[in-house]
Image (cartoon, rainbow, N blue to C red):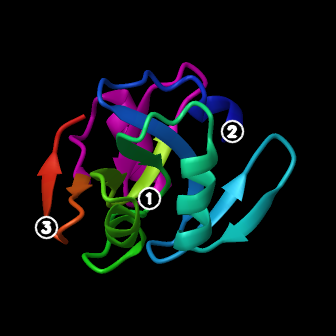
Amino acid sequence: MYERTNKIKPIDGFSDYALHSDGYSFDRFDEKASQPVDVFTLAQWIRSDPTYDGGNVRLLACRAGMYEDGAANTLAEVLGVTVRAPDGDLYVNYAGEYNIARSDSEASDIFAGVKMQTCHWIDFAPDGTFRIVDG
């Protein structure tokens, strides 16, 4: 997963962070391993990242945006910026193309063009509001 998420095309106005998530918590990973991380520790890590410019954050993390009161919402409040996160599982191929789906078979059908994506990116604002977005 680490190698694949590094190939996802960045979007203007957002800094990308690749993690695992169950919707309420995170696991930070690198080339070798993953480790549990709470939202406050993740916020400190993001703030201390020399590539982070203080702007909006896109979480490349399965289910991070699944719950209104979940991980992405809390991170938006803590950082004071918009946090964009998927409300389903993020599937990434080796070319860096991705979709958001609820199952492996649904993801395969979406990649094959047989089925439309049913999950979305959600933008969480620091004030607790959220909205569905494309991209």
Residue type at the position of mark 3:
Thr
Residue type at the position of mark 1:
Ser
Q: Residues within 10 Å of mark 2 (few under 14, many from 20)?
A: some
Question: What is the distance, in whole Å, between disc 3 and disc 1 at their CAs?
Answer: 27 Å
Q: Are marks 2 and 1 in contact (CB under 8 Å)?
A: no
From the viewer's perspective, is 37 left or right of 22? right
Residue at 49 percent across and 26 percent down: it is 8
Residue 122 vs residue 125, the one in the foreground: 125
From the viewer's perspective, is 121 left or right of 24? left
Q: Is residue 116 magenta?
A: yes
* Helix, strand or loop for disc 3: loop
Reading the image, the residue beneath label 1 is: 103
Question: What is the distance, in whole Å, between disc 2 and disc 1 at their CAs?
Answer: 20 Å
> In which quadrant of the rendered image does the C terminus lie?
top left
Point out the stretch of residues depicted in magenta.
92-121
Q: Residues within 10 Å of mark 3 (few under 14, many from 20)?
A: few
Residue at 42 percent across and 24 percent down: it is 10
> In which quadrant of the rendered image does the N terminus lie?
top right
From the viewer's perspective, is 45 left or right of 83? right
Q: Position of residue 17 (x, y in %)?
A: 53, 44
Residue type at the position of mark 2:
Tyr
Reading the image, the residue beneath label 3 is: 129
Reading the image, the residue beneath label 2 is: 2
First reached walking from the N terminus: tag 2 or tag 1: 2
Picture quadrant where residue 40 is located: bottom right
Residue 91 vs residue 58, the one in the foreground: 58
